[in-house]
Image (spheres, grey):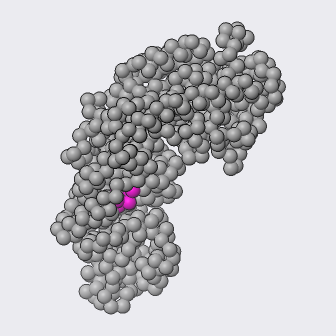
Amino acid sequence: MDIAALAARNPDHWARAACIRTLTLDAVAAANSGHSGMPMGMADVATVLFDKHLSFDASAPDWPNRDRFILSAGHGSMLIYSLLYLTGYSDMTLEQIKNFRQLGAITAGHPEYGHVKGVETTTGPLGQGIANAVGFAMAEESLRARWGKKVIDHYTYCIAGDGCLMEGVSQEAIALAGRQELSRLIVMWDDNGITIDGNVSMSDVTDQKARFAASGWDVFDCDGHDPEDIDRALTEAKASKRPAMIACKTHIAIGSSAQDTAKGHGALTDPQLVADTKAAYGWSHGAFEIPSELKSWWESVGQRGVGARKDWEDRFAALSAGKQADFTRAFAGEMPKKLSAAIKAHKKKLSEEQPKVATRKASQMALEVINGVIPETLGGSADLTGSNLTNTPDLGVFGPDDRKGRHIHYGIREHAMAAAMNGMYLHGGVKPYGGTFFTFTDYARPSMRLSALMKIAPVYVMTHDSIGVGEDGPTHQPVEHLAMLRATPNMNVFRPADAVETAEAWEIAISSRETPSTLALSRQGLPTVRTEHKTKNLTEQGAYVLADAEGKRQAILMATGSEVAIAMAARDLLQAEGIGTRVVSMPCWELFEEQDERYRKRVLPGGPVRVAVEAAIRFGWDRWLFGERGKREKSGFVGMHDFGASAPAGELYEHFGITAEAVANKVKSLL
């Protein structure tokens, strides 16, 4: 490739793009770590995007109607860091660029949401960004329908690489986007033909353009180093009535000796290579040095959206005070004040009527209250609406024909559903929740982990939570999934015992702003164990005394979900023999851990025998059995020790020994 000819054809553009390329070379060299090739190869595309198409204001990075830019190929993080520094984002200083990948710097190895303004989502695991982008675009469609074009009307742009498109989640995401006809979504594919191992052809023969077209997208292509051609493709993509993919033909690590090779994907740190590459660019400035006239031009790009932002603020100010307050509340993630009173009234009714319902049904009952009070909820299910019970009568179905609908049919796409929910939450203004079977957290978990990592709070409705699934057999019976999710930092895992605890769990989950929630809900009907109405949300304490011992306290039974009723029945058996027994319901371990020592000691005092009951594996229970003042020799567990089996639920509980009699006998064996 004739770099000199490229530079000569568009000298101003070439110099501006070279700012990104040289900052990348310098930062990666200083860190002796990173990925140089993608930012170098996509610098031309990014320059045209930011200069001519992206609507943003660097001085107001959280402006709600800005275009969203997502770098799905997150290993090329120096691309976005360079852009943020050059366009004048206040927290992205040159010092931060110089400290790329260093402890305490906001310039982490992969872009991390919350570390720096302008990074819309955490991208690193490939495929996540493009799937998040689908959620961003869905949120934009929903909000535009609700608030009108004067308030919400913008695009979502995403740069994705071959790795993003090879990951399976990408197919789930692009198929969902095609079905939803997300015309404001534009994905720019960095078509450089190189992965870490070598040429893409070593591992893949997919015709990506045909794949996107087959999934309902409009497909464009361009020379990724020709600014006029890039501009043309972006202009055409924006006019498309469907989601658009632009295949940008680029050279990875352009201008270096590593160009078009696997070496170009990684860290180009050799001083001679860096010097030779800069010379090829015609760049004679020192390390991290951007000439003032180029920096000024880039800063003018960052200020170009000021007018659009101020026009939007004028339009927003013309709304009624009530609409302004509701919009601001929703984007702040705050709940309407009437939510608390509505949940309390719902709980009172449940305690009085004492229904025997599956907690999945109890979840739907709670959602009927919540969805009526919170207009920004966006629910959905991965093709299990009738099983997850995520729909309520007032929602309608979100789709191309009804953008005001609030229930989404995700299809059998658990991973894309979870990733899209992250994108929706990050967009702001909506509160997403989505359902599947609890065992399929295996498919959703990469995105669930990122929810926790990013400190955002979508709600995962996971039904069919145990061997209570029965005849579906061990493939559908989650035994290790509670332990897996409880091991995840910053994840609240709720396993409610009845309809009252389910309502309380929903109130906590929907109100959370920094911690995602998983609701593990039963298939089988469960009796109401909270028969005495309490206005206080007891689930908020994580664990509480449901029934205390009569006489001297000799045993404490701890249980979650469907096994709380078993523990209560075991208490009856033990009390009949004069063995004073306390039952502690533990719907959320994480919230119990957060309680102060005095409260935890009141719930779990030292001395009595302790037995835990849960239709899952024991892993994690030892914290409560012989931590927290317990003793190993006075503790026991009644639950699963292997995978389940296919049979009616009642027979399985008998077969695996998860019964009131077994619990009572375990206590007596430890006394």
Left of 589 or right of it: where is 651? Answer: left
Q: Which quadrant of the rendered structure holds the N terminus?
A: top right
Q: Which quadrant of the rendered structure holds the C terminus?
A: bottom left
The residue that appears at 68% across and 46% down in the rendered structure is: 105
For residue 311: magenta? no
Viewer-side residue, 235 vs 380? 235
For residue 510: magenta? yes
| Residue found farthest to the left | 353
Can residue 126 be seen here? The reply is: yes
Rendered location of residue 476, percent (x, y): 32, 50
The residue that appears at 36% across and 21% down in the rendered structure is: 241
The residue that appears at 42% across and 75% down in the rendered structure is: 636
Viewer-side residue, 571 vs 247? 247
Q: Where 531 falls versus 129 (above or below)?
A: below
Can residue 645 be seen here? The reply is: no
Rendered location of residue 177, percent (x, y): 38, 30
Residue 249 lies in what quarter of the image?
Answer: top right
Left of 650 or right of it: where is 197? Answer: right
Tell me where the magenta segment starts and ends, as one range: 505-511
Q: Where 668 falls versus 138 (above or below)?
A: below
**Majority secondary structure in the magenta region:** helix
Q: Where 79 falls versus 495 (above or below)?
A: above
Q: Where 489 falls versus 501 (above or below)?
A: above
Rendered location of residue 282, percent (x, y): 77, 17
Residue 552 lies in what quarter of the image?
Answer: bottom left
Rendered location of residue 306, percent (x, y): 54, 32
